[in-house]
Amino acid sequence: MQTELTPAFILHHRPYRETSLLVEIFASREGRIAAIAKGANRPRSPMRGLLQPFRPLLAAWTGRGEIATLTRVEADGPPLPLTGRKLLSAFYLSELIMRVLHRHDAHPKLFLQYQASLKQLSVAEGEEPVLRIFEKKLLDEIGYGLVLDHSVDSGAPIDAGQDYFFQRDKGPWHIAPEVIPTIKVRGRTLIALAREEVHGPEVLQEAKQLMRFVLKPHFGDKPLMSRQLFMNSREHSG
């Protein structure tokens, strides 16, 4: 099977044999794809220098198995200017996709959100709102969208001044259910996430803890590499 050139990003790459690369691609129509870029490390390869994360690409590949063969790559724009915490945040978004999405499952809406999020990270003053909204969109896309507008035990609309107890697979409870694990979160934070207007230090901190709690089952036991890089960067910065 030969694909046509399609918008794509490189999520990750590593050396493969002597002169090739094994790349993880996130494509607009095909979703997450693993492919071998044969000879990509040779000095005269047309792919050399293009197969970098966060650079908009047009890519084509061939093959029906688990690992395809990359046949053509073209730049679809300049690399996005990401440095420091913004770069680490972009790596986190890519790691989310690799850990949560199955290969060959098409997610065109999430691809557009990933593309938009990278652009927002390159110009935004703070990265946290971009990350929280992407996490929310990711859960929506895989069928685990969050209930954020009403209490699941009473059905009443979320009250900004109330505290709630959020259950992973249900949503916010006004009264904490027995035995079932929950995380405490204020109504104003739930409303901010529902509106995708996540601002202010308290709301941002609660939203981060809530999304970590909800996403944990999708990651498994293996720690996130991007999260470790965040921690190391904080230690080095004092």
Image (tube, rainbow, N blue to C red):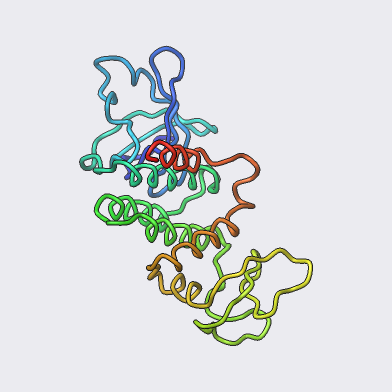
Location of residue 98 in the rendering, given as x and y in whole percent from the top left corner: 50, 42
Looking at the rendered image, the quarter that the N terminus falls into is: top left
Q: Toward the viewer: 69 or 186? A: 186
Location of residue 227 in the rendering, given as x and y in whole percent from the top left corner: 49, 43
Q: Residue at x 63, y 66 (%)?
A: 183
Location of residue 155 in the rendering, given as x and y in whole percent from the top left corner: 62, 85
Q: Residue at x 61, y 52 (%)?
A: 216
**In the rendered view, would you say 120 is above or below 194?**
above
In the rendered structure, the answer to whether residue 171 lies left or right of residue 36 reads: right
In the rendered structure, the answer to whether residue 201 lies left or right of residue 101 reads: left
Q: Residue at x 57, y 62 (%)?
A: 143
Instruction: Name the outermost residue toward the left.
Output: 78
Q: Toward the viewer: 191 or 186? A: 186
Looking at the rendered image, the quarter that the C terminus falls into is: top left
In the rendered structure, the answer to whether residue 130 lies left or right of residue 179 reads: left
In the rendered structure, the answer to whether residue 133 lies left or right of residue 77 reads: right
Instruction: Name the outermost residue toward the top.
Output: 18
Answer with the quarter of the image where residue 172 lies: bottom right
Instruction: Name the outermost residue toward the front.
Output: 238
**In the rendered view, would you say 49 is above or below 232?**
above
Q: Toward the viewer: 66 or 115? A: 115
Location of residue 83 in the rendering, given as x and y in whole percent from the top left corner: 29, 41
Q: Residue at x 45, y 26 (%)?
A: 22
